[in-house]
Structures are given as structure tokens and as C-alpha cells.
Image (cartoon, rainbow, N blue to C red):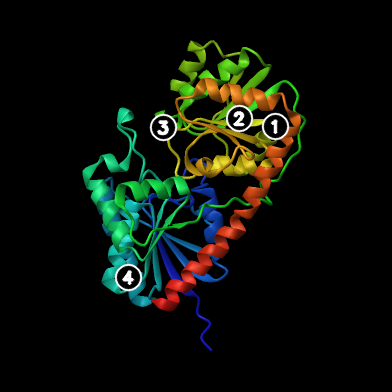
Amino acid sequence: MNTRKRRIAYFGVGPIATGPYGDGIPPLVELLRRLTDVYDITVYSLLQVDKSKVPNGIKVKTSVLNPSSLKIKMIILVSRFYLDHLFRPFDLLQGLAAYPSGWTAAKLGKLFHLPSIAVFHAGEVMEIPELGLGDILNKKLKRNIKWVCEHTDSLIVLSKFQYEGLEKNFHLGQGAKIIPFGVDTDSFRFFEKSLEPPYYFLHVAYCHPVKGQEMLLKTFKKIKRKKNVKLLILGDNHIDGETERLVELLNLKEDVELLGSYPNQELLQFYHKAHFLLHTSKYESQGISIMEAMATGTVVCSTNVGIVAELSSEVCISVNDTESELLASKIMDVMDDEKRYKSMQLNARNWVVKHNINATVSKYREMYDELLTNG
């Protein structure tokens, strides 16, 4: 009986053991770790990795020479893949993001007659002309994304919001599977808290125009005029950056703390302290911090992007990204209704448990087994 694990090659910019704390993309790292129970996994990373942060069972290959050119890095990675495939053939290829990783996986799949998967988890359907942001604003990138959509064997998106963006821009034929990155609901534990002042708000994101920190602070200031509130901001580049400038401009220094970034495993303490997550991004493919907040009992107040766009008012508070006044009003309504607040906490937790890391692993295994059987 052949018990060989089927071999899967993952291509990505820096999905695992990268970043200041070696967290990579935390829910993806946990997904790959759990999949190693069944599959033999090798990750080909364009970025250098912290080898001490690579989970047991996962092999990671990088560009040994680490040139500055992205194209040369990918050529080196493909060469490493070819040598590995020559001696121990792979059964399935997967790219994380459309370009260059998804494009590379699909090209190699055609060359070696292997099934390929592309997971769109970045800015593939982002379109914010006023900020000059979005892959589809770049004609070459848009062509490459379209090619991946048409030639990969299975296309994965993280939310209905993202799926609708693909449908609008690329008119998908066979469509895409919607599989969000589930969080580990055993690690991100639910915490019951009293809804009483001071009310703590939490924001978890790096400083960038797409993350909507101007709307964040203006919304918070509107609430501050009527309520006793505090705001904790976690993430890179806020201190001595645009966020700190806005905090000073809006005279919020006494009520806003810029705390810098933390390892993912240390975020739980902040979710448990906060009553609300305030997330005012202009675009998200999903929104990992939203899932983490929902898991821990921190009520989400957000713009209608990513996973939030498909959630009801029984689960979270949401508005369009121009409706700061409305967002503040909706939040204060919930502040004044503890019964509703408690109900939203439980509804959100139940939703996240249904779509947690176990559900993600199950869906990926089902997809892999189907492709491997048919391939």
C-alpha cells in the first residue's frame, strides 16, 4: 500500500516566517501547519525567512542569493522548484496572490501537467483611483490577474466582497471558491466584559492611506464628545508618522495611545481589554483583525469591506467609507444598549466558530483531494 504524502508546492512573496516577529500571515501559517498532517508541504518564498519561526513539518525555500530584482528572485525560486521536482515530484502547485505567485504556479502547472490553485488574498480587486491604489489600475497587472483567473485550475477568494469585485472586473466563467482564512478560536478565546466607561476602542493595522486612519480618528473624536472613551492603536509606522500627526491635529493625545506592533500571539490581551474594534479601511480582501475581534468578544465597527460586507447588523456595525458621522452614531446606540451589545458579541463568536481554522482546513483538504483525484 502506497502511503506517500502528496506533495504540494506553495509560491508566495513572504507567507511564512517573515515580518518583524516572524509571524508571516498568521492564519495561513496555522493552515499550512495543520495540513502537514496529511500533505508534504514546501513553501517557495520571495522574501528571506526567520528559520526559527518555521513550524515543524513545513519546508521553506528562498532565493539563496537574495538579489534586489523581484524577477531574478522568482527565476531562482523556480530553478529551486525545478530541481526539487526533478528528484521528488510535486503533485499540486499553489500561488498566494495573483501575481507573481499565482501566475507562476499556473504557468508551472501547465508546463509540468500539474493542477494549480491561486489564492487571491491581496489587492487583486482593489480600485481606489483617488489614492492611485489597486492592482487593476495597472494594465499589465490586470492582464496578469485575468490570465490567472482563466488558467488556474482552482481559484480561491476570501470573501463575497472580493468575489463580487472579480466578477465585476473579470466576468468569471466557472467562478471562484470563497474560503476565508479562519482563525484559531481556541487561541483567540471569547472574553465576556462589562459595557461600562471608559469604553475602549482598538485599531489593529499598519499606517497606510488604504487603512482609513483619518476616518478612524474623526469617528473616534465624534464619539469622544459624548462618551468617556479611549483608543488603542496597534501596528507599524503610526508613531512619528501620519497617524501621530493626525492625533495631534485633532487634539486627541490624551485619549489615544500609539502602541506600535506586537507579535500575533500577544494580541489577545488587547482584544480582551477593548469593547470595540474600530476598523475603517477603504479595502480589505477579508480582514484578519476583524475575525480575531469577533472571536474574542470585541464588537466590530467597520466600513463595508472584506468579510464585513456580508455580515448583518446582528453581528457587527458597518457603514460606507464616507459615513463617519453615521458610524459614530451607530456605535453610541450600541453603547447605550448593553443587551444588544451582548447579543452582538455572541452572534459574532458563533459566526467565527463556524468559519474557524478547522473549517478552513476541511475545505482545503476537500479541494486538494478533488484536484489530486481528477488530475
- Give the crowd class for mark 4: few <14, some 14-19, many >=20 residues within 10 Å: few
Q: Which label sits in the foreground, 2 or 4?
A: 2
What numbered label is drawn on residue 1? none
Residue furthest out toward the bottom: 1
Pair 1/3: label in front:
3
Tell whether label 3 touches label 4 (CB within 8 Å): no
Q: Which residue is pictured at 50% across the width and 41% down the height?
A: 309
Residues packed near mark 3 inside 10 Å, few (<14), some (14 to 19) or many (20 plus): some
Residue for point 29% across, 60% down: 150
Q: Earlier in the sequence, mark 4 or mark 1?
A: 4
- Return the residue at label 4: 83
Q: Position of residue 1 (x, y in %)?
A: 54, 89
The disc labelled 1 sits on which kind of residue?
Lys
Of circles 4 and 3, the one toward us is 3
Residue of label 2:
202
Q: Amino acid at mark 3?
A: Val
Q: Are marks 1 and 3 in contact (CB under 8 Å)?
A: no
Mark nearer the N terminus (4 vs 3): 4
How far is disc 2 from disc 1 in space, using C-alphas?
Answer: 9 Å
Sequence order check, earlier mark of 2 and 1: 2
For badge 4, the amino acid type reads Leu
Under circle 3, the secondary element is: helix
Which amino acid type corresponds to the residue marked 2 in the rendered image? Leu
Label 2 close to label 1 by CB (< 8 Å): yes
Mark yes or no: residue 241 visible. Answer: no
The residue mark sitting in front, 4 or 1, is 1
Relative to 171, 4 lies left or right: right
Residue that numbered label 3 is attached to: 210
Label 2: state its secondary structure.
Answer: strand
Q: How much space separates mark 1 and mark 3, taking CA atoms?
A: 26 Å
* 2 or 4: tag closer to the N-terminus: 4
Q: Which residue is mark 1?
A: 273
